Image (tube, rainbow, N blue to C red):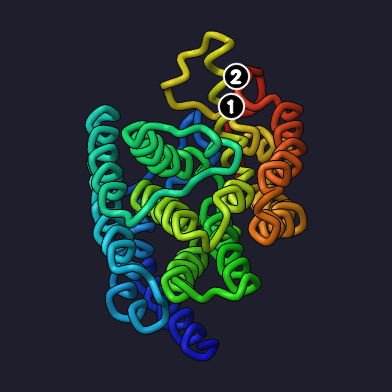
Amino acid sequence: MASSLIFVLSVSFAASAAITWVWVQIARRYHVIDQPNARGAHSHPTPRGGGIAIVLVSVAAFLAFAPHFSSHDDSLFFVVSLGGLAVGILGVLDDLYSLRARFRFAIQLAIAAGAVYFLPELPQLPVVSLIDWPSWLVFCAAVLSIVWSINLFNFMDGINGLAGSEAIFVLLGAVLILVVSGQHSDLGMLIVVVGAVLGFLVFNFPNAKVFMGDSGSCFLGYVIAIFALGSSGSDSISPWSWVILYGVFVVDTTVTLLVRITTGQKWYLPHNLHAYQKLARAQGSHARVTSMIFIVNVVWCLPLAVLATLFSDYSFLIVMIALIPITIGVVKLDGGRLSIEPTSLQNG
């Protein structure tokens, strides 16, 4: 098993790195370029849409390798592969043509609804499951959680390496939890995506030669949400373990949104008020902030995420312990609050 997973990881990494390099050349030739602006955190024109490599390699590898290295349910495999491809294509079109937000959101809802319909079963949350919720409400909550994850990842893809390193951490964290709990379902599929993201990161961290774009960030948000719903529904991983693994992104995005709403801002407009963006401006370095968040993930979130699955009866308490310090940190960084400060960095 281990040698097979290493082989899959290596092939996925190499293919993704090669496709990312090719995409950089194409993007430069056809001017698929992000220009610096007041809201952004970069000061140099940079090719965008490099996440297409993550999408292509992941979906191709799912079809080629995953059936041999996991005991996944056929419906879950179908949802991850075809749904992920659909989200990736939507992201590519958005990278190329800047689709209207309402149209993009409507398509995301449709893809998420289809995904939830074909999932074998949905998770029951501790404490929340004490109430007998109607099936239509559970369905809607699952659909919205997928759409939220897609956009959450997109919101947090604002500095070099952050979205990629978060995806690697969450997916490898899930791998560790499965191994520790004596299960090996879906390891191959998780490792495939890790390899694809690593190949992309060669060109995105510490200095960005290409941006992930919506193609990559939306795909990763979708895939993580589907793995979370699928593994939680089958009781392989506690749903609260996924929340903890995803904790920094979930808290920063949620707190920032709530602050913007309660302070009367036009919360639906693009902005640069996330806590991680403010920290990056204060530190003057993308790489430093990305590294700091990764360390917090490994040292704080990972052990608690493992415990939340091993001691599932206490998982709700564990998730509170995990997220409260992160929430305090985001609040102290004034996530979502308007302030006068430099709006760009000499990075990328």
Q: Is residue 348 visible?
A: no
Q: Residue at horizontal 29%, vertical 50%?
A: 115
Q: Position of residue 259 (x, y in %)?
A: 60, 19
Give the amino acid at mark 2. Answer: Val
| In the image, residue 25 above or below residue 187 | above
Within-10-Å neighbours for mark 1: few <14, some 14–19, many 20+? many
Asked if residue 142 shows in the view, the reply is yes
Q: Position of residue 93 (x, y in %)?
A: 23, 46
| Residue toward you, 222 or 141 | 141
Question: Could you tell me which secondary element the residue under label 1 belongs to?
Answer: helix
Q: Which numbered marker is on residue 195?
A: none
Residue 235 on image: x %, y %: 51, 59
Taking the image as shown, residue 342 lies to the left or right of residue 186, namely right
Residue under label 2, please give it: 259
Quadrant of the rendered image containing residue 166: bottom right
Q: Quadrant of residue 53?
A: bottom left
State the SS at label 2. helix
- Which residue is disc 1 drawn over? 256
Q: Amino acid at mark 1?
A: Thr
Residue 231 image offset from top left, x and y in percent = 47, 59
